[in-house]
Image (cartoon, rainbow, N blue to C red):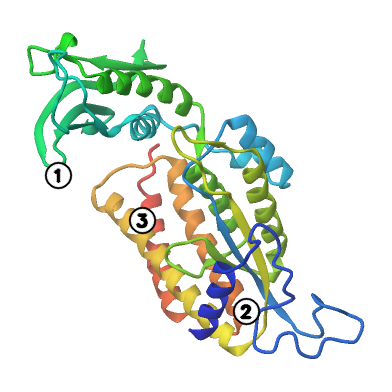
Amino acid sequence: MLAAQAAFDLFENSSDPDKDSGITALGPNARRGLKDGDGPGSASDDVLLGELVWFSVSDAVRLVPETLTAVLEAASLDAERLVPRLPSPTSALSRAAEAAEVKRRKLTKDRAGNDVQEELYVSVLLRTASRGVKQLVTEVLDAANSRLSYRPVAKVSPGYENGKPDGTVAVERDAEGGDVPDAELFEAEVDTITDLRTHYAFEKDRHDGEAARRVLGRVLFEANAVPLRNSGGMYFVPEAHAEFARKILLFVEEVRLRAENAPTRVARPSMAMKVPLVDREEYREVLAESVEFFVKKEAESLIKEMASLVKGGKTVSGKRGRGFVERVRKLKENVSEYEELLQMQATEARAKLDIATREARALLQRIEP
């Protein structure tokens, strides 16, 4: 695994990771034998396996649909097919709640409006009460961060009108049920409710960094890319699909240039780079291990998901059933390409795919009429 570690070190330590690295190829002595006059960045007679692609897009990135469409088009990607849906009202509320919370604000007035002489702090938090509902609660803390009191303030949820989201936040307060009465609200509690409404209005119309990474995931899927570490962000793209590597760099660069920041957060600059990987035996071994691990993991996930539907006797829509079949087919295509590229036999991965194929066939019998 030393070859993989060398690749990781190169990617993590780049001083300019949002562009092509400028390195001809990664591999033992890859720069030896450059022909006179070729200069740095020339590739002699080395055969390339493909591209190592690394990218980082912060969760704090925000993109309106029009901007994300422009980003995709600038990267020569199919915007109509790749732009995801906007976040659900519940997801937008969760993002807004994270931004609206108050942590350890100095408490100057008590609930009766009297000056506070002690060193006390207030935290106003939004906790999940049920699906789509948050409970706003307040903690009063002493200088040692010990909790002195804990009181509910309100329940908040996305607003609806005639069964459809209306873009507002519904605030439900019940003083008789224990919520803090209006006359006793801390300034921090009023600020939190106000900020929650403002941030929700912002978040409901925007994609976040996770959505941008999901778009990249779909592009990598089309490129038959294989992840090289569990945390993601670093992939191998076969040479036959190298054009996708270039498009990923363009996409990330456009996100860096066009994206907004989340409320109360500043996104780290989006970055990406790629390095051509030369054909070396030790690199083939690393990639072969990665292919086996990735395909087995994906196949096992599919098997579990399909088996639960079959055993539960549930019917599935034709679209969903065909989606499972397509995912299995794509994994088989992935394995075949890598077996040819790396001259390997992905025995364990193929065994898992055989099981996944049988589950997919069984699932097709459950498609609703």
Q: Identify residue type, mark 1.
A: Ala
Could you tell me which residue is drawn at 36 percent across and 11 percent down?
Answer: 161
- Percent from the top left, x then y, of residue 27? 65, 84
Q: What residue is shown with label 1? A: 144
Q: Is mark 1 on a helix, strand or loop?
A: loop
- Mark 3 and mark 2 in contact (Cβ < 8 Å)? no
First-in-chain label (3 vs 1):
1
Q: In this view, does 147 lie above or below 284?
A: above
- The answer to which image quadrant residue 41 occupies is bottom right
Badge 1 local density, few (<14 within 10 Å), some, or many (20+)?
few
Position in image of residue 17 (x %, y %): 63, 61
Q: In which quarter of the image is residue 80?
A: top right
Q: Which mark is residue 340?
A: 2
Q: Name the side, left or right, on which 215 lies relative to 202.
A: right
Mark found first going from the N terminus, 2 or 3: 2
153 on left or right of 218: left
The residue indicated by pointer 3 is 362
Q: Which x, y percent locates residue 365?
A: 37, 50
**What crowding class fits label 2: few (fewer than 14 Cα within 10 Å), some (14-19), or many (20 or more)?**
few
* Mark nearer the viewer, 1 or 2: 1
Q: In this view, does 61 lie above or below 353?
A: above
Foreground disc of the pair 2, 3: 2
